[in-house]
Amino acid sequence: MTMLDACRLGRADVVRERLAMGASPNGEGAGASGADAPLHAAIEITKRHGRGPARLEVLRLLLAAGADPERRATRFRATPILLAAIAGTPEFIAPLREAMRERPPAEDPVLAAALAERDDVARLIAAHPAAAREPDAGGWTPIVAAAASRLHRDDLRAAAALPEIVSLLLTHRADPNDAFTFAAGGGRWSALAWTIGHADNLPLARILLDAGAAIDDPVAAFEAAVNQRYEGLALLIERGLDVNHAMVLHRLLAEPTSRGVEWLLAHGADPNVTAPETGESALHVAARSGAGVRAFRAILAHGADVNARNRRGETPLALALQHHRRRLVDLLGEAGARA
């Protein structure tokens, strides 16, 4: 088991043993390139590695051994405390604050925004108004950090403060369309994409939209759909998002999961809209991707043209045959499809 795996799994016994054997608490190669580091591995929440007290014990071990609480790592190019705010793991914040006494988060506009410290944000902006817009060394601006923070989920104070912080930043000319670019070509997420697709903070999303955040942000719509943030997706549609123009259904069907497909179809997605570059309809994409039978049935039930042809002249049935999607071949045949 590697040091990073032990940190992710909360294996304090393994981490303690590796540190005693001379392993670095900062790991190897972590930094802005997108590599991971032990502190970050202990903090970041994934579907495979949940949260729990064992990971907090690991974090305390690493800090006691000299892990750098200001080191940036992962594709987020984030410090550990910023990552804790993004992950929505408040249990890590107190020990990280203690480790950062020489350069406290209260003196950093990005960290103060992510940690929902409204008074600190106001104080820092009053002293230096441009701080409302300036990125940190990792490329995070205060408005994007506040939008990405998930601390509101378990903290009523943070739930009230985060929208107030964003409103304050906007009055100091922060850009409602500001975005963060991930390391190593990992894409670009706007503040709206973070708050709707990740943080699920609708009051904050409304403030961004009122201030002019782009309604047709394809990442925001896609992430809301794939993460089943249906209230956020409904808000985007209410504000004028054309899900067909944004090709949200096509993007969902190209992914291994088909979550969100039925909701989109029930809320106006047209299965016969075709992608401009390929001429593919939703059925074409589903036939060649990992879309499941349930999603495929839903597309058929909403009037998909089973004999539509893409720019190469291929029908959904032809693609299903090429990709050995036998169950889909049967469904298409029952619906009257031709190759």
Image (cartoon, grey):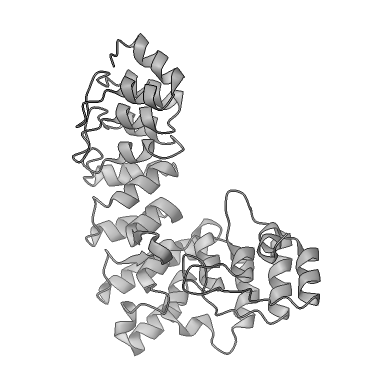
Q: Quadrant of residue 165 in the image?
A: bottom left
- Left or right relative to 59: residue 282: left
Name the foreground residue: 329 vs 123: 329
Vertically, is 72 above or below 10?
Answer: below
Picture coordinates of residue 249, whole percent (x, y): 32, 36
Picture coordinates of residue 294, whole percent (x, y): 44, 24
Picture coordinates of residue 252, whole percent (x, y): 37, 39
Name the foreground residue: 132 vs 318: 318
- Left or right relative to 64: residue 86: left
Vertically, is 128 above or below 134?
Answer: below
Residue at 24%, 62% in the rendered image: 211
Name the foreground residue: 149 vs 119: 149
Vertically, is 174 above or below 152?
Answer: below
Residue 182 can be seen, yes or no: no
Q: Quadrant of residue 315 in the image?
A: top left
Q: For the N terminus, which image quadrant?
A: bottom right
Residue at 68%, 76% in the rendered image: 25
Picture coordinates of residue 220, whole percent (x, y): 33, 51
Q: How many marks?
A: 0
Residue at 65%, 79% in the rendered image: 67
